[in-house]
Amino acid sequence: MKNDKQFKINLDEIIRTLSSVAMTLRENPKKALKSLRKIGKNIDRQIPYRDGHILRVTEYSLAIAEELGFSEEEKVVLEVAALLHDFGKIGIDESILLKPRKLSEAEKEEVDMHVMRGYYMLAGFNELIEALGGIKHHHEHFNGSGYPEGLKKGEIPIIARIIAVADAYDAMTSKRPYRRAMSKEEAIRELKANAGTQFDPAIVKIFIKIITKKEKKLISN
Ligand SMILES: [Fe+2]
Ligand SMILES: [Fe+2]
C-alpha cells in the first residue's frame, strides 16, 4: 500500500472545477460532463482498490436509463449524480477507507455519512440540485431499511434507485481490501436475492438483462 500522502486531493481545485461545471451544465452539458468525469476519476484515485468504480457505475446507470427511455436532459441529471455519488467520501479518514478488514460499527457509520457529506458539499450549486437526490439517496433500500432517510419504493428518486443497483454490482464484482471480487454470476444472484428488499426489482431485472447481454461493450476505463 502506498503512503497516504498520495491520496491528498486539492479541494480548491475541485471546487473551482465544480463551479465551472455548474455554470456550463445547461448550455454545454457535454463539456460540463467531461470535467465531471475528471473529478470522478480523481475521487477514485484517492482509493486504489476503487479505481474506475465511478466511471463503471456511471456507464451501468446510463445503460439502465437508456432501457427506461430517459430523455437527454434526464440522462444528464443521472450522469451528474452517478459521477458525484461518492463525492462525500472526500475527506473521510483514509485509514478507514483502506482498512484491510471489515469495518467496525463506528467506522461504518463514518463511511455511511458520505451521502450527507456529499449532499451538503454540493448543495450550494443550484444547477446540481436535481442530481442531489441521486447522491443523497443512493443507499436507501426499496423496503425502507436504508439510509439516510429510510425512504421506500417510489419515494426514493429513480436516479438513486438506478445508481444503487449499478453501485452494488460494481462493488460486489470488485476486489476489496477485506474480500475477493465476486464473479458476475454470484453478483447477479445477490442482486436477485435482494430485489424488492434492498433494490427496486424492476431495475434489477433491466440491469441483469443488460449485463448478461452486453457486459463486454459496457466496460471501459
Ligand atoms: Fe455510496
Ligand atoms: Fe459507489
Image (tube, rainbow, N blue to C red):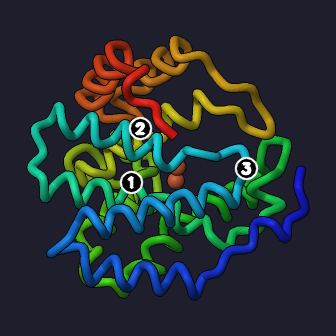
- Measured from the top left, where is residue 215 in percent x and y? 40, 21
User: Disc 1, disc 2: CB below 8 Å?
Assistant: yes
Q: Amino acid at mark 1?
A: Ala
Q: Give the mark nearer the N terminus: 2 vs 3.
A: 3
User: Label 2 to label 3, Cα distance in Å?
Assistant: 19 Å
User: Disc 1, disc 3: CB below 8 Å?
Assistant: no
Depth check, front residue: 74 or 149: 74
Callout 2 secondary element: helix
| Residue under the point 50% across and 60% down | 40
Above or below, 139 against 188 in this view is below
Q: Is mark 1 within 8 Å of ligand 2?
A: no
Depth check, front residue: 59 or 217: 217
User: Label 1 to label 3, Cα distance in Å?
Assistant: 19 Å
Tell me, for residue 48, which label it has, or none. 3
Depth check, front residue: 221 or 207: 221
- Measured from the top left, where is residue 148 in percent x and y? 45, 61
Above or below, 110 against 210 in this view is below
Q: Amino acid at mark 3?
A: Pro
- Measured from the top left, where is residue 1 in percent x and y? 89, 50
Q: Give the mark nearer the N terminus: 1 vs 2.
A: 1
Residue 101 visible in the displayed image:
yes
Q: Which residue is mark 2?
A: 166
Q: Amino acid at mark 2?
A: Ala
Tell me, for residue 82, which label it has, or none. 1
Q: Residues within 10 Å of mark 3 (few under 14, many from 20)?
A: some
| Residue under the point 38% across and 85% down | 19
Front of the two marks 1 and 3:
3
